[in-house]
Image (cartoon, rainbow, N blue to C red):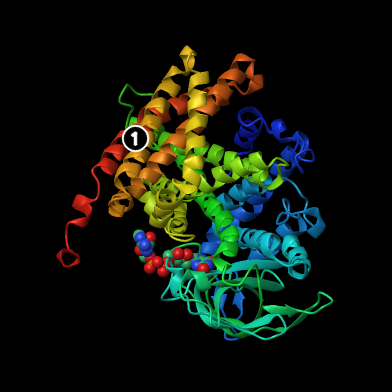
Amino acid sequence: MPTYKAPVEDVLFLLNDVFHIERYNNLSGFAEASPDVIEAILGEAAKFCEEILTPLNRTGDEEGCRRHDDASVTTPKGFKQAYQQLVDGGWVGISAPAEFGGQGLPSFMTEVVSEFLSSANMAFAMYPSLTQGAMAAIYAHGSPELKATYLPPLVAGKWTGTMNLTEAHCGTDLGQLRTKAAPQGDGSYRITGTKIFISAGEHDLAENIVHLVLARIEGAPQGVKGISLFVVPKLLPNPDGSLGKRNGVSCGSIEEKMGIHGNSTCVMNYEDATGWLLGEANRGLNAMFTMMNGARLGVGMQGLAQSEVAYQNAVAYAKERLQGRSLSGTKFPDKPADPIIVHPDIRRVLLSIRAFNEAARALIMWTALQHDVADRAEEEKARQAADDHMGLLTPVIKGVLTDTGFANTVMAQQVYGGHGYIAETGMEQFVRDARIAMIYEGANGIQALDLVGRKLGKDGGRAVMAFFNEVQAFLKEHSGDEAMKPYVAPLGEALGHLQQATMWFMQNAVSNPDHAGAGATDYMHLFGLVVLGYMWCRMVAAARHRLAAGADGAAQRLSAKVVTGRFFMERMLPETAAQLARIRSGAASTMELPAEAF
Ligand SMILES: Cc1cc2nc3c(=O)[nH]c(=O)nc-3n(C[C@H](O)[C@H](O)[C@H](O)COP(=O)(O)OP(=O)(O)OC[C@H]3O[C@@H](n4cnc5c(N)ncnc54)[C@H](O)[C@@H]3O)c2cc1C
């Protein structure tokens, strides 16, 4: 049975030594997040995830969710009690505004806890994370009445949220959406249509479910410019806040699927269901994007989370499994064979996963802090810069962390040899669970197109130029430091590749957009390696600083950072040269064959 230990120390290193959390104390909620509060919260979250959620991961996968004849859905055994503990602990609303019952703590706290939850039990973690997305959309776009009715129970976790975009004939291309909304003259709408693949669409964890549903108001324009967003509760709330009659929404079936069996993936039928407009009419995608952007970061986190738990188990196995002898001479003569961790190829696998995980965690933390700046800073300029950062890096985090996260679960499975393919070890579940993160919340090919087609050129390239400038400033600052040379030199080269690729798109993709389409995924991964390389440089600089100051019993951990960072620079970052070459080859060979030749 797999185990999990939440990486609390690594998170504290990032907060204290790399990102200097005290520098954010001018933002609301940060003063309350004092070091002892953060440590206490992370400790509690770790305990809940390690002791309660981790054992439920395997049983939840085996049992799955069940739909009954009355269209109700039950989650696997133990989920309900665990969910109640989550609610009792106030975890859903830790970063939500106090006026709606939240704790008002910075949103990076929610991100950290989400990683722990998702490593321990990804299927379970999706219930609160979708709720947090719904809360964000209602908070940003809801009328005072909608906020007053829906936010307090969502923040408390008494109600959960969903996002309903997908229909059978329309996934990526939401312009084809058919679900209808008919105005009732009293401010409400009647919603009719069928949505598919709706995560957490029906379940037994909470007393009510709040569906955020994309639909087209009668007479609205075709395409994406005619889509609106609606709040459609399962049970209609009475004016006094109590729960009233059942709305016209029900679960038609649940999908049999590859992984995340503990999360119900539902076909949702809306038959004259009562809903209320969220945000402006025909601007529904804009409102839904508030939920989707948060969700995309959350899905990127799922890639890291599965990679982390798979890594931890692979390391434990590699230390135990005795096969063969070390190439450089027997290391454990008293044993019948050496543990496989002595083999360079096993180490290559483990270090590749670890070097990704630690940098990906830093990237998420950096972006979560930018999220707090974007939401809470007083200065318009600071908010705008943070918003630019989020917009640029959201597709990178979603696409790169889930592609690589999935690949890492496969590599970790490989460490187990044949035993990794057997259900009992739990490694194949990580592979199956991680796979969906590459697909939902905008398949990764679409993330790459979003980065290249929308984010690079937005506001005259302001966001990408700010990113280049920041990395260049770091490189310059450390250029005279001999010990940092093995880090800053490769990062400088990789940044050059990214800049050349960006320039190549500017010069070639306008005349032939297929050049951008054919190179987009390579570009997204090239961007990912550069930003992860930048995270490594910052982590190594911070670790070396601490080591020079005495390290306080953390010397082994900090020295491991310095070595893992070097592995990243020597063994992973050089891929950027190949990515640049692929991008520069353009679209010709990709597009030449006619469809019938395939
Ligand atoms: C388990 C699960 C849970 C889900 N949860 C939810 C949920 O809670 N709410 C919800 O609304 N949806 C949910 N989805 C739906 C999911 O978001 C969609 O499956 C996804 O957006 C892709 O849509 P699609 O499946 O129709 O694929 P399609 O849109 O048909 O795409 C097929 C392939 O073509 C590519 N493609 C499409 N258009 C283009 C283009 N213009 N350029 C280049 N490539 C393109 C895509 O990248 C993809 O690889 C879930 C799906 C699953 C399987």
Q: Disc 1 on helix, strand or loop?
A: helix
Residue 20 at what x, y percent from top left? 66, 30
Percent across and percent down for residue 349 are 38, 37
Residue 216 left/right relative to 138: left
**How dense is the environment of label 1, judged by Cα within 10 Å: few (below 14), some, or many (20 and up)?**
some
Quadrant where the C terminus sits is: bottom left
| Closest to the observer, 256 or 470 | 470
Tell me residue 129's x, y (percent): 62, 58
73 and 210: which is toward the camera: 210
Q: Is residue 435 left or right of residue 152?
A: left
The quadrant where residue 323 appears: top left
Count the numbered circles shown.
1
Residue 201 vs 580, above or below: the answer is below
Residue plotted at (66% across, 49% down): 110
Task: Tell me if residue 340 can be seen.
Answer: yes
Query: Where in the image, quadrant-wise, is ligand 1 located?
Result: bottom left
Residue 1 x/y as whole percent? 52, 52
Residue 319 makes an appearance in the image? no
Which of the pair 155/39 is nearer the observer? Answer: 155
Determine if the C-beta at disc 1 is less than 8 A from ligand 1: no
Q: Quadrant of residue 294?
A: bottom right
Q: Residue at x 46, y 27 (%)?
A: 565
96 versus 353 height, above or below: below
The quarter of the displayed image where residue 507 is located: top left
Task: Give the residue type that dot 1 points to.
Answer: Gln
Task: Give the residue at mark 1.
Answer: 500
Choose between 216 and 439: the one closer to the eye. Answer: 216
